Image (spheres, helix red, strand yellow):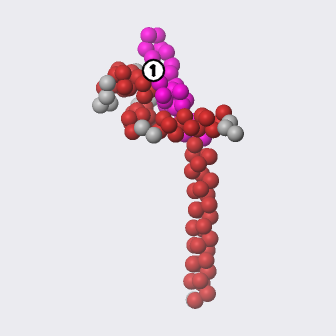
Amino acid sequence: MTTTNDLSIDRVFKALADSGRRRLLDQLHAENGQTLTALCACMNMTRQAVTQHLQLLEAANLVVVVWRGREKLHYLNPVPLHAVYARWVQKFERSHLDLLHDLKNQLEGSAHEKA
């Protein structure tokens, strides 16, 4: 059974699957709140391509749009990235760290026994 949370995580993975979209996220991380024109100036792609990538990033909730007068500003939203980290990275990272900690204790114990 697919949950709403699974679907939103799927959208994040789909958005991150493209190097152009990852570069857009990097650009927003470097300078948040950019217009489409500013983002296009930094990217090696057409305005239409940047627009399509931004739409997919918005659908994944990785980019949030705020209107300031007639300007449409794009902001990075790190919350979905943290959800992916918590669901898919952190749990595996924790077990590896536990194993390394146990190995360290065993090696230190062996060193103390020899001394």
In the depicted structure, whether residue 55 falls above or below residue 97: above
Q: Quadrant of the C terminus?
A: bottom right
Residue 53 vs 114, above or below: the answer is above
Q: Residue furthest right?
A: 1
Residue 34 lies in magenta, yes or no?
no
Pick out the residue farthest to the front. 1
Instruction: Report whether 89 appears left or right of 35.
Output: right
On the image, which quarter does residue 41 sit in? top left
Query: Residue 65, how many percent across, how many down?
Result: 50, 21
Measured from the top left, where is residue 76 in percent x and y?
A: 49, 31
Which residue is nearer to you in this view: 93 or 6? Answer: 6
Secondary structure beneath dot 1 equals: strand
Q: Position of residue 12 (x, y in %)?
A: 53, 36
For mark 1, does the 10 Å Cα neighbourhood hold few (<14), some (14 to 19), or many (20 or more) residues? some
Residue at 61% x, 74% y: name it. Answer: 105
Question: Residue placed farthest to the top in the image?
Answer: 70
The picture places residue 69, in percent across and down from the top left corner, at 46, 10
Name the side, left or right, on which 30 lies relative to 98: left
Instruction: Name the residue that disc number 1 marks.
Output: 73
> At 47% from the left edge and 24% from the top edge, which residue is drawn?
55
Q: Is residue 61 visible?
A: yes
Quarter of the image for residue 45 reads top left
Residue 26 in sight here: no
**108 displayed left or right of 30:** right
Q: Nearer the viewer, residue 13 or 23?
A: 13
Q: What's under tag 1, amino acid-wise?
A: Leu
- In this image, 15 relative to 4: left or right? left
The stretch in magenta equals 55-83
User: In the image, what residue occupies the spot 57% across and 83% down?
Assistant: 111
76 in magenta: yes
Tell me what residue is drawn at x 44 percent, y 26 percent.
54
